[in-house]
């Protein structure tokens, strides 16, 4: 028996709790960002793709991309490529975006198309 604190095996079947919500504290700022964006009327604010097109490939909802952008602004992450990387590895962003991880071009196009 080792005299060190042992971590869990990386090969275990579940690394996260069953609910991602368990990892985000009640006073975490991402909850405020989520609540703020949920109250906005994105169509009235003239966000592109606020009304989905009837044909073609489905796009990301503008609320998801706005949450990602606001999170980046609050945490001094300006680069679209860094935001893409953070969305893939940061638990707060996984919670905020519903585990969606848009690529850097999608994030950059959202910024350019919506005057962010």
Image (cartoon, rainbow, N blue to C red):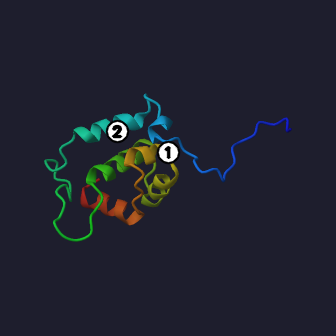
Number of on-image labels: 2
Task: Bin the neighbour count of mark 2 within 10 Å (Cα to Cα): few under 14, some 14-19, many 20 and up.
Answer: some
Image quadrant for the N terminus?
Answer: top right
Q: Mark 1 = which residue?
A: 91
> Looking at this rendering, what residue extends furthest in the bottom direction?
56
Within the image, what quadrant is residue 57 found in? bottom left
Within the image, what quadrant is residue 106 found in? bottom left
Relative to residue 73, is residue 91 drawn left or right? Answer: right
Relative to residue 107, is residue 115 drawn left or right? Answer: left
Residue in the image at 58% along x and 47% along y: 15
> Looking at this rendering, what residue extends furthest in the left direction?
44
Q: Which of 22 and 90 is in front in this view?
A: 22
Label at residue 15: none
Q: Nearer the viewer, residue 58 or 115?
A: 58
Residue contact between numbered discs 1 and 2, judged by CB atoms under 8 Å: no
The spot of residue 2 in percent (x, y) is 85, 38
The spot of residue 52 in percent (x, y) is 19, 60
Residue in the image at 41% along x and 41% along y: 74
> Looking at this rendering, what residue extends furthest in the top direction?
27
Task: Bin the neighbour count of mark 1 within 10 Å (Cα to Cα): few under 14, some 14-19, many 20 and up.
Answer: some
The spot of residue 3 in percent (x, y) is 85, 35
The spot of residue 10 in percent (x, y) is 67, 51
Residue in the image at 46% along x and 61% along y: 81
Q: Is residue 17 above or below residue 109?
A: above
Q: How far apart are marks 1 and 2 (CA)?
A: 15 Å
Q: Which of 62 and 75 is in front in this view?
A: 62
Between label 1 and label 2, give the one nearer the viewer.
1
Q: Mark 2 = which residue?
A: 33
User: Could you tell me which secondary element the residue under label 2 belongs to?
Assistant: helix
User: Could you tell me which secondary element the residue under label 1 belongs to?
Assistant: helix
Within the image, what quadrant is residue 30 found in? top left
């Amino acid at each position: 028996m080792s005299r060190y604190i042992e971590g869990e095996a990386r090969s275990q079947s579940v690394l996260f709790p069953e609910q991602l919500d368990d990892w985000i504290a009640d006073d975490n700022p991402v909850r405020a960002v989520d609540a703020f964006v949920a109250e906005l009327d994105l169509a009235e604010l003239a966000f592109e793709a606020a009304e989905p097109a009837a044909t073609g490939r489905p796009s990301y909802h503008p609320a998801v991309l706005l949450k990602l952008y606001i999170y980046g602004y609050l945490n001094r992450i300006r680069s679209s490529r860094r935001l893409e990387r953070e969305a893939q590895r940061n638990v707060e962003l996984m919670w905020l975006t519903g585990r969606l991880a848009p690529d850097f071009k999608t994030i950059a196009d959202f910024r350019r198309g919506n005057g962010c």
